[in-house]
Image (spheres, rainbow, N blue to C red):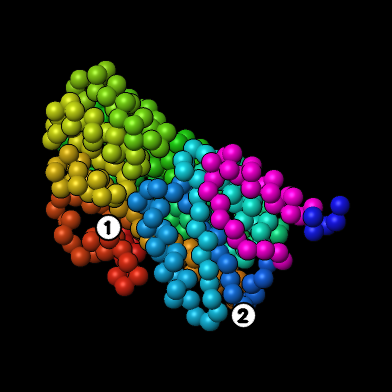
Amino acid sequence: MGRRTSLVLLAGILAVTLAACGAQVREAGGGDGGGTEEGPLRIAVVPKAVGFDFWEQVRIGAQCAANEADGSEVTIQWDGVTAETNVSGQVDLLTNFATQGVEGMVYAATDAKVLADVSQNALDQGVTVVNIDSGTDPQPQQVPVVATDNVAAAEEATEYLVEELGGKGEVAFIPFQPGTATNDTRTEGFKNVLDENPDVELVAEQSSESDQNVALEVTENILTANPNLDAIYAANEPGVLGAAEAVRRAGKEGEITIVGWDTAPDEVKAVEEGVVSALVAQNPFRMGYDGTNAAIDAIRSDAQLEDIDTGSTLVTQQNLDDPDVKAVLEPSCSNKPEVSGQ
């Protein structure tokens, strides 16, 4: 069997394996890398999962960076698994991109420990790697993290929650995927503030598994078991949406303070309606934009990459019409949101 035939068969096996894992894969082009400091560049941008408003804003930012890049053509190859819990699918997808010879990978790690080896293997193959939103453990020295300062943002959101409660009451916590950097740092910031406010009691903690329907069921169970619940802290978009729907069904809108993360349209609508009190608006556009620009700079000029804090804003009914907030909620290449919260 010739070398060319072997490679074709290997590519077919990889494609079948990826399909079985639920990864959505597009051909990344062939062979020996192809891109150079002067020539066309191919950057794979991989979210934790496709189908969420947050990650779509990342895609818009990454494409904007590619469109604005000086010099040669930059092609963004956007793909992802369909569920943030599909760690093996993301591993296979990223491994395939590196094997196909992309020059750069910009991705959000679904599992900090599992994806560390993927980053290192890509680096060993000469691929530039940038993490967005979530890094790995360990984090390779040459791989920057372009993300929210999740601990600081979680502390700000929890301080707001405590203030809304008047410094005392019962609160439930809905994390989403223990083991991911974002989940664990948002937990850390939340519990840092609770430690400083002993009259705010944590009475329940259950994961949404990054699934809105699971979050709905979890919250309904929490409300049944804790009829005097005063507040909910939800650590990501599915958790907020599930919690808000559970509170609506229980007829407790305005009675239970909900503070959470991300700003999908239905979340913002819940703030407008008073069902959700506050949301941590990250800057996913900047994650995609700054992360892709960092990869391009490193490939073309061998730039030393550093971590970037993309900032965050606490969104409430009172500031929804602020132009800076609107730019974060509805970003575009012609109206880029600034980095806030520094």
Residue drawn at the location 67% of the way across and 63% of the way down = 30
In the rendering, at what x and y percent does residue 76 appear?
51, 65
Indicate whether 12 appears above or below 239. Answer: below
Residue receiving disc 1 = 329
Q: Nearer the viewer, residue 204 or 328?
A: 328
Tell me the CA gap for discs 1 and 2: 35 Å
Magenta region: which residues?
6-32
Left-right relation of 278 to 36: left
Indicate whether 241 appears above or below 28. Answer: above
Residue receiving disc 2 = 38
Residue type at mark 1 is Leu
Residue 7 included in the magenta stretch of the image:
yes
Residue drawn at the location 44% of the way across and 45% of the way down = 182
Indicate whether 13 appears above or below 43. Answer: above
Give the farthest residue toward the top.
225
Instruction: Check the picture and name the quadrant holding the C terminus.
Output: bottom left
Residue drawn at the location 42% of the way across and 33% of the way down = 209
Task: Say which element carries label 2.
Answer: loop
- What crowding class fits label 2: few (fewer than 14 Cα within 10 Å), some (14-19), or many (20 or more)? few
CB of mark 1 within 8 Å of CB of mark 2? no
Residue drawn at the location 29% of the way across and 39% of the way down = 240
Left-right relation of 70 to 96: left
Q: Nearer the viewer, residue 32 or 109?
A: 32
Q: Nearer the viewer, residue 182 or 212?
A: 212
Q: Earlier in the sequence, mark 1 or mark 2?
A: 2
Indicate whether 60 appears above or below 228. Answer: below
Task: Say which element carries label 1.
Answer: helix
Left-right relation of 209 to 154: right
In the rendering, at what x and y percent does residue 51 appear?
40, 48
Q: Nearer the viewer, residue 97 or 105?
A: 97
Residue type at mark 2 is Glu
